[in-house]
Structures are given as structure tokens and as C-alpha cells.
């Protein structure tokens, strides 16, 4: 049985956990993920401790573990998850995104970045956490940073996550499966950001939209675009993934090189020259292309492909996924067909087998889930 002791100390609220909290750390591309144990967590004002109900492994995590690029290690991975608040810091209570007091027992998802509170944008902006996180120059990133003393539980591949003050937290409905809601913070938010960007420049009702791949972001965007009245085509080289995209709301699916042309709007979540060019070639002259990969800077360069230039496409690169997109994604997923979205999770593994979730065959499932 697990027990939790709460002690008020001058340094904050100290939460002792028995058995200890456990998190999985990436320590380098040539090593398996390593478990770390955390016996107690000290919460400051505005902070909270969430017990993880379910986490999903997103493309960002897979890119970190498979990349030979030097990452700052150890890094607790994971920023797609659903949790439940089990402890709160001292002083004034934290608020959820809808302005209510964050309470013990709340089922929550949260934005994957949190404002640093120290940069010039943070210091000059007195607005709320949503605006501050969007503007911050050096946000802390859940699941993407070196674990530090005092903030060891910084990612979702864990039993618990330590939510820093200023984290934009959204309450999740109790009856929607965690597998449906966990991807809201990354895949859902990225899809929302791309569609919002497209919709600002072109009405989506009746528009012909082509999406460059049937990954989690792609199929989520397909479902969202279809819900806004668009006619959606999804491209993917893999027939299993193409079939799945149809269930998410695509009207048509094709291998990238054989699809029809003349779409009004192209969405790319892959972020490679080939993927951008493939959807650009399927877009009408003067149409719109929105690129929403994970890193805006290289995408601004790669997006000027031959097809983009020859078709004189209007180009928009999504610079940043903001907390507001997480909230919109969560609201969409709570109303979506749970059976379809839950199917995107191919397997759920226990936390002690977390390393196995990083060796999944990606065409068979869009997400592997981890349950503590
Ligand atoms: Zn991610
Ligand atoms: Zn900042």
C-alpha cells in the first residue's frame, strides 16, 4: 500500500512518498532508460504534485531517445499525460486555466511548458499564466529538461509529476478515458495550433485540406478539420496508417506520390523537406501551407521547397504551441469519439517496463501508453 505524509517546513510543504515516487530518466542514446526513486518532494507556493494516471510516449520522446545529438541528461521524459492532484504547496492555492482553485483529487492535464518567471517577457508581463507561458523566452519544459535537485519529477514517464508554479493546468472530465486525453498536451495542441493558424487565413468550412502524414498529430488534425467542415485527405506511405486515418475523419487517403492535386490548405507535421514538398505538390496555386513540426527555426528554411515556390503558396510556420491550444485540444478530445482516439494507443505497459514503450513499431500504433 502506498502512503503519503505531508509536513509543513520553512522551505515549503514536504511530501514524503512510500514507496518512493519513481521516474524514468534518459541518460544517453546508448543506454536503456533508468529508473530513479524520489523519497520526498518539497512544494512551494503555487506548486502541486500530480499522481500520473496514464502517460503516452510522443514523437518528441522518441526523437530524444533515438537521437545521437547530445541531450542534457539525465532527463525525465514524457509530457503527454493525465494525472490527479495529490498534494498542494503552501500559501495561496494555484488556479486552473478556467480560474478555479486547484483542489486535491482534481483530474488534470497541463501545458508542456511553464513560464520561467525571470526573463524580460515574464518580468514585464503581469498577465496570467496562459499569456506568460506563451510569451516566455526560456520556459521550463516538462519531459524535455535535465532533472535538477528539487525538480526531479519533471516528466510524465513517472508515478508523479511536480507541477511548478505558473503551470497552466486544465481539469479533465472523469469519464473520458485517459488514453484519449493524454495526447492533448502535445499532439492535440500541435494539431489545434496548426488548424487555428490555417483558419485565420482561410475559412475551413468546405475547404479541401491535405495532411502530410497519418501520425498522431496528423490524424488528430484530420478529425479536427473534418469537425470544422473541411474535406480532408491524408497522405501516408503505410496502408495500416492510411486505413486508420479514415476512421479519424479523413474523406480520402493516398500514398504520398499518387494523391490528387488541387487542395486549398496543406498541413505538415513532419517537418522534412520531402514531407512539405509532397503536400505542397498536392495544393492548388496560391493555396496555403501550414508547417507545424516541433522546431520552427529549421522549418522556416526548409519550407521554401520547389513546389511551394512554383505554386506561390502562402506559407505559415507555427512558431509555438501555446497553453490555449492544450485547452482547446482537451475540449475537442472530451467530445470526440473515444473509441476511435483510444484505438490510437496500441499497447499500455506498466511503468517498470517503460523502456519497452520506446522500442514500439510505430506503424502499428500511434502511441504506446505507460501506466504506473
Ligand atoms: Zn511531444
Ligand atoms: Zn520567462
Image (cartoon, rainbow, N blue to C red):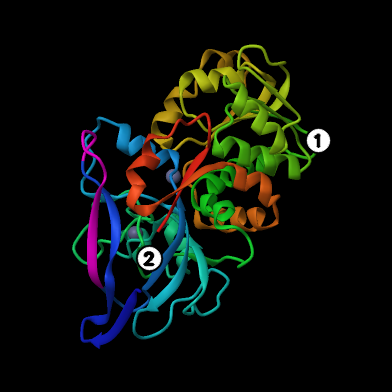
Image height check: is 60 above or below 129?
Answer: above
* Quadrant in which ligand 2 is drawn: bottom left
Q: What is the span of residues highlighted in magenta in the rendered image?
A: 28-40
* 185 and 35: which is toward the camera: 35
- In the rendered structure, does residue 60 fall within the stretch colored magenta? no
**Secondary structure beneath label 2:** helix
Q: Which residue is mark 2?
A: 124
Mark 1 vs mark 2, foreground winner is 1
Q: Label 1 CB, ligand 1: below 8 Å?
A: no
**Secondary structure beneath label 1:** loop
Residue 281 in the image: state x and y as whole percent.
62, 16
Q: Residue at position x 36%, y 40% from top?
A: 356
Image height check: is 241 above or below 274?
Answer: below
Q: Is residue 292 left or right of residue 57?
A: right
Q: Which residue is mark 1?
A: 206
Q: Residues within 10 Å of mark 2 (few under 14, many from 20)?
A: few
Q: Label 2 CB, ligand 2: below 8 Å?
A: no
Residue 101 in the image: state x and y as whole percent.
51, 80
- In the rendered structure, does residue 36 fall within the stretch colored magenta? yes
Q: Residue at position x 36%, y 86% from top?
A: 91
Residue 348 in the image: state x and y as whole percent.
48, 48
* 208 and 120: which is toward the camera: 208
Q: Residue furthest front?
A: 1
* 159 and 149: which is toward the camera: 159
Q: CA distance from mark 1 to mark 2?
A: 42 Å
Of labels 1 and 2, earlier in sequence is 2
Q: Quadrant of the C terminus?
A: bottom left
Residue 171 in the image: state x and y as whole percent.
56, 68
- Can residue 324 be seen at all in this image of the molecule? yes
Image height check: is 189 above or below 314?
Answer: below
Q: Which mark is residue 351?
A: none
Amino acid at each position: 500500500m502506498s502512503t503519503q505524509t505531508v509536513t509543513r517546513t520553512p522551505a515549503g510543504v514536504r511530501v514524503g512518498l512510500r514507496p518512493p515516487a519513481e521516474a524514468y530518466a534518459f541518460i544517453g542514446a546508448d543506454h536503456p532508460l533508468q529508473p530513479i526513486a524520489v523519497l520526498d518532494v518539497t512544494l512551494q507556493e503555487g506548486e502541486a504534485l500530480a499522481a500520473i494516471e496514464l502517460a503516452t510516449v510522443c514523437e518528441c520522446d522518441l526523437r530524444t531517445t533515438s537521437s545521437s545529438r547530445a541531450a542534457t541528461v539525465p532527463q525525465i521524459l514524457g509530457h503527454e499525460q493525465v494525472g490527479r492532484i495529490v498534494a498542494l504547496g503552501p500559501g495561496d492555492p494555484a488556479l486552473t486555466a478556467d480560474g478555479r482553485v486547484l483542489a486535491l483529487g482534481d483530474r488534470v492535464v497541463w501545458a508542456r511548458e511553464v513560464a520561467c518567471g525571470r526573463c524580460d517577457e515574464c518580468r514585464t508581463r503581469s498577465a496570467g499564466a496562459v499569456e506568460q507561458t506563451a510569451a516566455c523566452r526560456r520556459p521550463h519544459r516538462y519531459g524535455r529538461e535535465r532533472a535538477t535537485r528539487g525538480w526531479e519529477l519533471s516528466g510524465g514517464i513517472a508515478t508523479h509529476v511536480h507541477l511548478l508554479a505558473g503551470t497552466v493546468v486544465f481539469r479533465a472530465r472523469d469519464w473520458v478515458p485517459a488514453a484519449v486525453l493524454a495526447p492533448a498536451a502535445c499532439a492535440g495542441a500541435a494539431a489545434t495550433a496548426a488548424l487555428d493558424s490555417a483558419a485565420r487565413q482561410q475559412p475551413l468550412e468546405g475547404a479541401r485540406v491535405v495532411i502530410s502524414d497519418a501520425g498522431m498529430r496528423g490524424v488528430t488534425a484530420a478529425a479536427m478539420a473534418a469537425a470544422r467542415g473541411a474535406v480532408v485527405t491524408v497522405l501516408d506511405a503505410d496502408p495500416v496508417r492510411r486505413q486508420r486515418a479514415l476512421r479519424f475523419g479523413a474523406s480520402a487517403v493516398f500514398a504520398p506520390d499518387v494523391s490528387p492535386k488541387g487542395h486549398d490548405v496543406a498541413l505538415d507535421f513532419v517537418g522534412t523537406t520531402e514531407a512539405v514538398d509532397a503536400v505542397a505538390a498536392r495544393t492548388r496555386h496560391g493555396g496555403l501551407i501550414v508547417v507545424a513540426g516541433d522546431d520552427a527555426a529549421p522549418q522556416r528554411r526548409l519550407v521554401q521547397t520547389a513546389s511551394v515556390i512554383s505554386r506561390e503558396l502562402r506559407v505559415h510556420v507555427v512558431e509555438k504551441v501555446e497553453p490555449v491550444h492544450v485547452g482547446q485540444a482537451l475540449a475537442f478530445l472530451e467530445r470526440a469519439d473515444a473509441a476511435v482516439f483510444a484505438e490510437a494507443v496500441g499497447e499500455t505497459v506498466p511503468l517498470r517496463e517503460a523502456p519497452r514503450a520506446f522500442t514500439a513499431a510505430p506503424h502499428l500504433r500511434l502511441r504506446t501508453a505507460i501506466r504506473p
